[in-house]
Amino acid sequence: MKRVLTANKAGSNEKEEAKLFARDLKDKELFLYRKLNEIQKTVSDKNDVMDRVLHYLVKTLDAEQAFVFSFDKSSEGLEMIAVTDRLRSIYAASGYKPLRKPCTLSLKKHSPIRVSGKITPYVRSIITVPAYTFGEGLPLAVFGAVNKMGAREFSLEDEKLLSAVVDQLQQPLQYSYLFGEVERRNKELRLVYKIDQLIDQVPDFTELLHRVIDEFVVTLSAEAGVIFLKKGKKLEVAAANDAARSRFQRSDYLLLREIAEDSIEKETKVSNYADLDKNQKHFDATEIRRSETRAALSAPIYSAEGTVMGAFVVSSKKNKRNFSAEDAKLFTAIASQADNAVFQEREKSKLRNAFKRYVSESVVNELLKDPESLGLGGKRQNVAVMFADLRGFTPLAEKMDPKELVGFLNEYFAVMTEIIFKYGGTIDKYIGDSIMALFGAPITRRGDCFRCVQAALEMQRELVKLNRKWARAGLEVQFKLGIGVNYGEMVVGNLGSPQYMNYTVIGDNVNLAARLESNAKPGQVLVSKAMYEQVSSDVAADKLAPLLVKGKSEPVQVYELKGIL
């Protein structure tokens, strides 16, 4: 009995609406005012409010479709916040561009606009009315309707009616917009905080990705979520929530991957895919029929260098057919935060792990501020390069027990490395009992040359201390060190094969430093003329006779470093 009464009531309402729509403008305005008040009192979700408003606008204006754009302050553009189904299925993929033009013009002119003619293959007439904030008169939104039923264009009466509706909605729209911004920002901050917690609590990267996509799904009230990452040229699933994994068996995997690929190809912050079962232009119709996915949001994942690494995808809005413009806006924000927190921070972590054995912590931190300063593709720059080699090591090594030998070398390298790091140098490589170090790469800083000679002299002093320590322990080990230093332009970058890369320097100036080291006597630090000119005012050095070295047709001027002034 109750169902019958409800049905009868609904039927009587429809008859009442039909009668009112046939009356004059004043009756229509009064009817809409009553309905708008009713909607605002009974409907809590602001997206539902707009959907209901559009329903009555279509009927009252005798239009085919209706829509609402909000003005986004950050981009100074229009964002679709509500649209009837037909318009969504036709224009969602294009970002509603055909509708934006008259709306933008309407906002600019501060007046309603009525246009007729063949605007697009679907739109033959359109009406738009802008809304502004109270007091400041700042752009707030644009309401519009498309295709007047049974007529070529919308009338002045339609314009007045739509303007009356906009006036009625201006205040609640302004409050709703402000509240929505605060609500969206709170959701964004909650997710960022949660991801930061997960990064600290979940060391396994794969598990971290699963936990992150779970948070995406909850925040956006979605059902399924997937993270795709590039492997070569293909996208592969890196993480998915339980609902997504269960759907993969029913063609959802192929559809979601196509969605991810399409969003990457568009190169937009976020793509909103609505009514996929009705809008089959971009994707395989068979896959859509087999799939449970009817709507999705997708955003590319970017590396710190700005290259695309993959995509985030969430699908199937809970209790709704499609994701709203507000959902898309929130998704844009959290996807951007997540790829920075999860992927770019991971890249920084990999960079930190890769360089922490070769440079000091302070240099690593500078690298992380500007990873592009690495010049991994190769670049020319001035660098101070040092070669340090133990003298008399080979004959001694032949007599020593291998374990004992490794113990000596490890202690020696530990002390020398600490000195190089202390002065901001980079360990390029260990070559047997030799060390190659750089000052000025990967980070170029003022005073690189002076710190290089400081390090060289301290290395000599510390080796003397090590020899004394070993002698007191009854060990017959007396190492001597020969050091060669040069300064000049070199090619710096990651060199090697795809399987093994090494950050290093190459060039004639590198070779000269190696030649100086090979000519240095035990305990001696030889520096080139170019290096001496960089530090001459701060060091004591003896000018030696020009030295003929391999690879040079003319003798090179050499200085023996004695100390710091």
Image: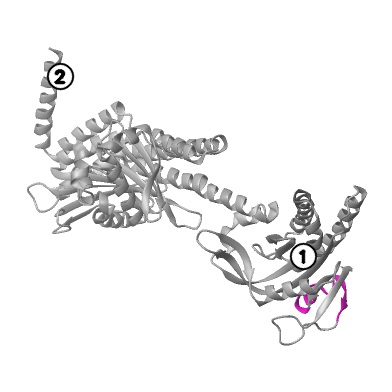
Magenta-colored stretch includes residue 560:
no
Which disc is residue 388 wearing?
1
Q: Where the N terminus falls, by quadrant?
A: top left
Which disc is residue 6 wearing?
2
Magenta-colored stretch includes residue 535:
yes
Between residues 105 and 406, which one lies in front from this camera angle? Answer: 406
In the rendered image, the vertical position of residue 480 relative to residue 319, given as above or below: below
Q: Amino acid at mark 1?
A: Ala
Report the mark closest to the observer, 2 or 1: 1
In the rendered image, the vertical position of residue 36 relative to residue 124, given as above or below: above
Q: Is residue 447 visible?
A: no
Is 76 displayed left or right of 9 in the figure? Answer: right
Which residue occupies 78% across, 57% down? Answer: 416
Residue that sits furthest to the bottom in the current view: 554
Which residue occupies 57% across, 64% down? Answer: 494
Quarter location, residue 243: top left
Q: Which residues are magenta?
A: 529-544
Quarter location, residue 7: top left
In the rendered image, the vertical position of residue 14 relative to residue 342, given as above or below: above
Judging from the image, what secondary structure is the residue with disc 1 in?
strand
Query: x%, y% of residue 143?
Result: 26, 46
Mark 2 to mark 1: distance in Å?
Answer: 93 Å
Is 178 displayed left or right of 70 in the figure? Answer: right
Which disc is residue 294 wearing?
none
Query: x%, y% of residue 27?
Result: 15, 35
Judging from the image, what secondary structure is the residue with disc 2 in?
helix
Residue that sits furthest to the front in the current view: 399
Q: Residues within 10 Å of mark 2 (few under 14, many from 20)?
A: few
